[in-house]
Amino acid sequence: MRADVEKTSYAEAAPRKKPPTPVRPQKRIEPPVVTSPKIEPPVSTPLKKAEPPPLTPAAQNPANQTPSVFTRSAPSTDANIRNAGLLDRLVRAYPEFLQSHDGQSVAWRDGERMQFDDGRDKTSGERLELPDLEDSFFDAYPNGADATNPPPDFDPGRSIFEPFFTKMYGDCKTGDVENRMAEVVWLPKNWGGKIKATTVNDVDERLSKISSELDDLPSEFMKYLKPPSDGYSCRPIAGTARIGMHGYAAAIDLNQAFGDNWQNARRSRRQYRYRNRIPLEIVDIFEKHGFIWGGRWSHFDTFHFEYRPELIAGFDPGPAAPRPDPAQTVARPTPPPETPQVQNQPQPTTAPAQTDALPLPERQPRNIR
């Protein structure tokens, strides 16, 4: 009983714990939302791409454009388009003889038509031995370029379609070419000798203009220009049955002492190293008048030039003249060379120009092209 009283007393004596006061959650104060005005990026007007000027009809066809160095003839997905452009150049180059073309053949003024492309794929050797007109354009002639080593078998214009040029210039074996030749005084101020050139396509007059421009070059250029080694020569190219442009009196070789030829540069039967000593100032003058240079061939002949205006992109031979009648054509008379009048200057150590033509050096058989 005592224990119960004590237990009760102890229970009454113990303080009663108060329940914890509930904590009210505080209201979260959100920061004020600051709204800034939206800045739109400036509206930029797109720049209008400048439109290129419209192409001329000649420029629209890649065959009429000046090629880069060492390229094949202007490519085209359509061979007909390509050939049409090349035929344009061919007709434009020989206006006295060619009238038009139909994209596949060229029409002569006498009514004859000549096929342009025989459609055959050929090796470089076949393009020389079995050419058509199109084969001359297989490699694009790089007029105006520097003289650098061409890649193998890069020979623009080395292929000559003889039926085309024989019809135009005549056959040297029958005397047709000689009946239409004239003498050209070469370098009247610095040499005064004479070379022979055809009057067809005014080749003789073009060579006379070239001679005048070359004659005004500084004296250090003269050693390359005189005496010329070859002009007209009616004989096949050495080792072949082909007649080159010399057989049509439409080519000239400069001083052979400074000329380099691929056959003479052979290190072995198949290897040879390109070499050239002819200054490009001389080459530029020839190309300006429609002559191509043998130094642009991998089978190089660096002192050789021939009249092939169809291969020079953009060349304009001038207005067409009446076509000459071969039966009545007479060689043009050549005026005597003029002796330059020099006053108050010491006489040059070299011989002055002479009114009598100097004889050409004896021609030697050539191993070219």
Image (cartoon, grey):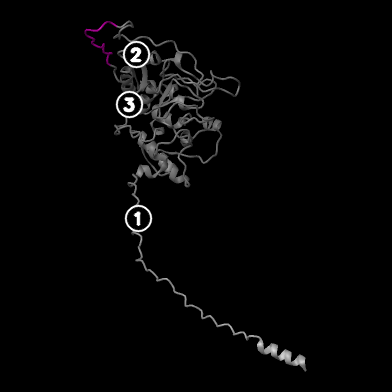
Q: Amino acid at mark 3?
A: Asp
Magenta highlight range: 335-347
- Are circles 3 and 2 on residues that touch, CB within 8 Å? no
Q: Nearer the viewer, residue 347 or 77?
A: 347
Q: Position of residue 52 (x, y in %)?
A: 34, 47
Please indicate whether residue 51 sits to the left or right of residue 15 in the image.
left
Q: Secondary structure at mark 2?
A: helix
Asked if residue 164 is positioned above or below residue 269 in the image, the reply reads below
- Tell me which numbered mark, 3 or 2, is placed earlier along the sequence: 3
Please indicate whether residue 238 sits to the left or right of residue 246 in the image.
right
Q: Position of residue 256 (x, y in %)?
A: 45, 15
Q: Which residue is mark 3?
A: 202
Q: Amino acid at mark 2?
A: Ser
Q: Which residue is mark 1?
A: 46
- Tell me which numbered mark, 3 or 1, is placed earlier along the sequence: 1
Please indicate whether residue 329 sits to the left or right of residue 275 in the image.
left
Q: Amino acid at mark 1?
A: Pro
